[in-house]
Amino acid sequence: MLAAALLAAAATGPAAAQQNFDKVEIKVERVAPGVAVLFGSGGNIGVSYGVDGNVLIDDQFAPLVPKVVAAVRTLDPDPIAFLINTHWHFDHTGGNEALGKAGTVIVAQDNVRRRMAVDTVSSRFGTIKATGKAGLPVITFTRDISFHLNGDRLQVVHVPNAHTDGDSLIYWTGANVVHMGDVFFHRLSFPFIDRDSGGSIDGVIAAVRRGLALVRPGGKVIPGHGPVATRAELQAYHDMLVDVRAKVAAQVRAGRSRAEVLAARPAAAYAGKVAANGFIKADDFVGGIYDDLRKGRRR
Ligand SMILES: [Zn+2]
């Protein structure tokens, strides 16, 4: 989520209904040959473009679809053949119905379709309505799937129980670019882990490790939110996650209460550096880790 959209959502329910999209501009950044990122409002959109057809990764909000389509046309005049959703959240899938009706084939991990097909009650966002049939993925996969086009191979790799239970990383093998989805929030905020949708701190750490294993040195990393990052910045984010988790785990082992763990401020060193006190405050991040670890101990 973009910080502004998230704040609106937290205050008033799903942002899609309230936010004014008229003033949103879609900014195009070319990342590598045949690879671009579109920034607007909502999750960062990855694009694979070229002679074999255009592929979108996520699509922000429904009112932005005409602007997104126009931005893709500046890269390549062909239609958008495929859309891959990194996960089900409404700021990444809001354009699905319009694109599906226009003939784009939507692809996502099984749990993305399962969650989008029904109304969802979220502790953070309230009730999120089911997506209409045209917006649901028509091709789903359990573990991974590859696209062989535009002179490259796009590996779509499911990472279980991370930001949600349906996340995928998308890796351009030739261009050496990875789109991390919301497994990676770069600079804007501490990570948002949607535990209502099956997310967990250990899943996020494993997913970031998977991203680091995919992208070779010198590659580019597209986060779900925030500017394009280097592999070293993804590594720093990983190290932050591991460090804060270890500090919380030591406190849990010592029998500290949730309030005591928060008071020890184990994430304080990272506010304003690797992460920021944006949408997810340090206390939300640390408290969530505490809850995950306590849950693990009870099992
Ligand atoms: Zn998300």
Image (tube, rainbow, N blue to C red):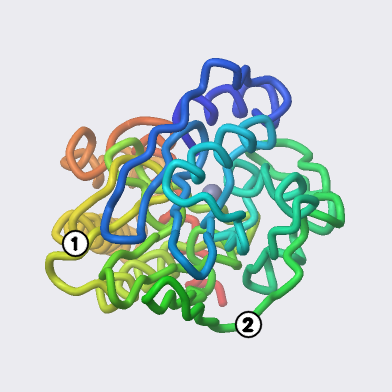
Question: What residue did someone put label 1 on?
Answer: 231
First-in-chain label (1 vs 2): 2
Q: Quadrant of residue 155?
A: bottom left
Q: Where is residue 89 in the image (x, y as percent from the top left)?
A: 62, 49
Q: In this view, does 243 lie to the left or right of 142?
A: left
Query: In the image, what residue occupies the spot 45% across and 55% down?
Result: 47
Query: In the image, what residue occupies the spot 73% across and 36% down?
Result: 126
Q: Which amino acid does label 1 sit on?
A: Arg
Q: Quadrant of residue 239?
A: bottom left
Question: What residue did someone put label 2 on?
Answer: 142
Query: In the image, what residue occupies the spot 28% across and 76% down?
Result: 174
Query: In the image, what residue occupies the spot 74% across and 60% down?
Result: 115
Q: Nearer the viewer, residue 237 or 93?
A: 93
Q: Is residue 193 visible?
A: yes
**Which of the labelled discs sits on residue 184, or is there none?**
none
Q: In this view, does 19 lie to the left or right of 38?
A: right
